[in-house]
């Protein structure tokens, strides 16, 4: 299964020159824990950073900075890791583990943002697959009991 099949296509984005207050409002409005910072390049939306709810608390609220003056670009994590939409689930999990990140923007071959995959998405997928395997074991046991009383 590719990430293209499971990623969330409705990604909340923001530009780096927006105030962090706008990022917080977007997170509240859309009930998300992060926004992807994008730049327009040749008509494409290219991810260049990420701001999480934790960034807002640790970098802005805890330091009592003015949330109307500080911009998203001031606090965003500029080292952003992305995954291609053609990547498999194992590759995605490996990248998340290696880079210790819970969120990965999904990009096409040109680097344009097409979705987002999170640790929660991967846990949900894996738990469904494990449940399917457990059902298979149970089914085989019942089948054997029926055919070999």
Image (cartoon, rainbow, N blue to C red):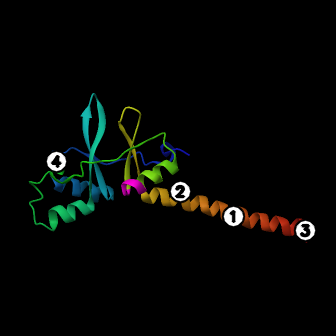
Q: Position of residue 115 (x, y in %)?
A: 40, 44
Residue 13 horizontal side relative to residue 100, left or right: left
Q: Which mark is residue 18?
A: 4
Horizontal arrangement in the rendering, residue 21 relative to residue 38 (left or right): left
Which residue position is annotated with label 2? 125
Q: Which residue is mark 1?
A: 135
User: Closer to the observer: label 2 or label 4?
Assistant: 2
The disc, 1 or 4, on the residue closer to the chain's N-terminal end is: 4
Marks 4 and 3, the one that precedes in the sequence? 4
Q: Which is more toward the observer, 68 or 78?
A: 78
SS label for mark 3: loop
Q: Which residues are magenta?
A: 97-102
Marks 2 & 1, CB-CB < 8 Å contact: no
Residue under label 3: 148
Relative to residue 97, is residue 37 depicted above or below? above
Residue at figure coordinates x 72%, y 65% from the top left: 137
- Disc 1 and disc 4: Cα gap in Å? 49 Å
For this rendering, which residue is in front, 139 or 22?
139
Circle on res. 55: none
């Amino acid at each position: 299964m590719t990430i293209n099949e499971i990623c969330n296509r409705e990604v909340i984005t923001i530009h780096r020159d927006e105030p962090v207050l706008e990022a917080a409002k977007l997170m509240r409005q859309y009930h998300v824990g992060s926004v992807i910072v994008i730049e327009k390049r040749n008509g494409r939306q290219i991810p260049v950073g990420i701001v999480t709810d934790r960034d807002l608390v640790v970098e802005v609220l805890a330091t009592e900075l003015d949330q109307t003056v500080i911009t998203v670009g001031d606090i965003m994590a500029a080292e952003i890791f992305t995954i291609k939409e053609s990547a498999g689930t194992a590759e995605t999990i490996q990248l998340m583990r290696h880079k210790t990140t819970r969120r990965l923007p999904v990009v096409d071959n040109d680097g344009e943002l097409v979705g987002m995959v999170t640790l929660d998405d991967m846990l949900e997928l894996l738990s469904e697959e494990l449940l399917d395997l457990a059902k298979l074991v149970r089914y085989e046991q019942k089948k054997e009991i029926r055919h070999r009383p």
